[in-house]
Image: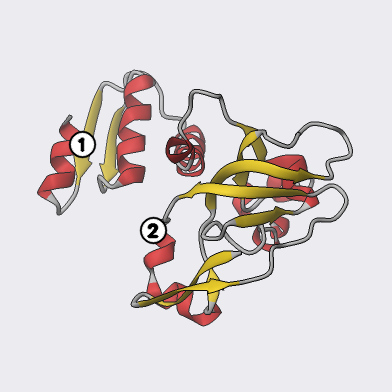
Amino acid sequence: MRVAVYYNNNDVRLEEMPRPKIGLGELLVKVMASGICGSDVLEWYRIPKAPRVLGHEAVGKIVESRDEFGRYRVGDRVFVSHHVPCNKCRYCLSDHHTACETLHKTNYDPGGFSEYIRVPRLNVEQGVYLLPDDLPFEDGTLIEPLGCVVRGQRLVQIQKGDCVLILGSGVSGLLHIQLACLLGVERIIATDISKYRLNIAKE
């Protein structure tokens, strides 16, 4: 299968890699779209682990399933979470999932910038979501960033009537603006150094 292998920000190569084989409880997903996270372009952060296949906002179609419980079938359109928490440790139980050790050890294989990904059993159990038929795959790549926004606003308890300051009007900032509007926030202040982004934020 074809994969995009990251070596550095100026060197991403289209290479061949064997298609992953799945085990019991796992899925094989044909990737239809994958988002590019802000962390994917932070060279200082990515180079120590290069070369590698990036992409962790993947959506696609299940082409092979060994899901014992029959939750997912071949042909299902899905979003796949790259990191999943254990939901059992003290961090998870206190709603601080990002501190969970399991969260930092889980991932799919090899990455969203490949033709196929192997979805490990734990990710299948806790991080696969069916996509509505009318949702384009490209829109599905925003599920993970939107999830981060929803969780962030929940943790700081944003509610109707609040005044909210959003630092940065990139994709995450725009999602924060939209969610704050839906929550009935009284006043939203958005910042950015890009006039283009600020104009979109105003829209």
Q: Quadrant of the N terminus?
A: bottom right
- Which residue position is annotated with label 2? 38
Kind of residue indicated by mark 1: Ala
Give the answer, above or below, for where 94 lies relative to 38. Answer: above
Q: Position of residue 12 (x, y in %)?
A: 42, 74
Q: Can the viewer see residue 96?
A: no
Mark earlier in primary sequence (1, 2)? 2
In the image, is 82 to the left or to the right of 92? left
**Up/down of 55 relative to 51, above or below:** above
- Image spot of residue 121 (x, y percent): 80, 50
Q: Nearer the viewer, residue 113 or 148?
A: 113
Q: Is residue 51 visible?
A: yes
Quadrant position of residue 110: bottom right
Label annotation for residue 48? none
Label 1 and label 2: CA atoms lie apart by: 18 Å
Q: Circles 1 and 2: CB distance less than 8 Å?
A: no
Q: Which mark is residue 201?
A: 1
Q: Residues within 10 Å of mark 2 (few under 14, many from 20)?
A: few
The quadrant of the image that shows the C terminus is top left
Residue at the spot 61% in from the left edge and 46% down from the top edge = 81
The amino acid sitting under disc 2 is Gly
In the picture shown, does residue 49 fall above or below 202?
below
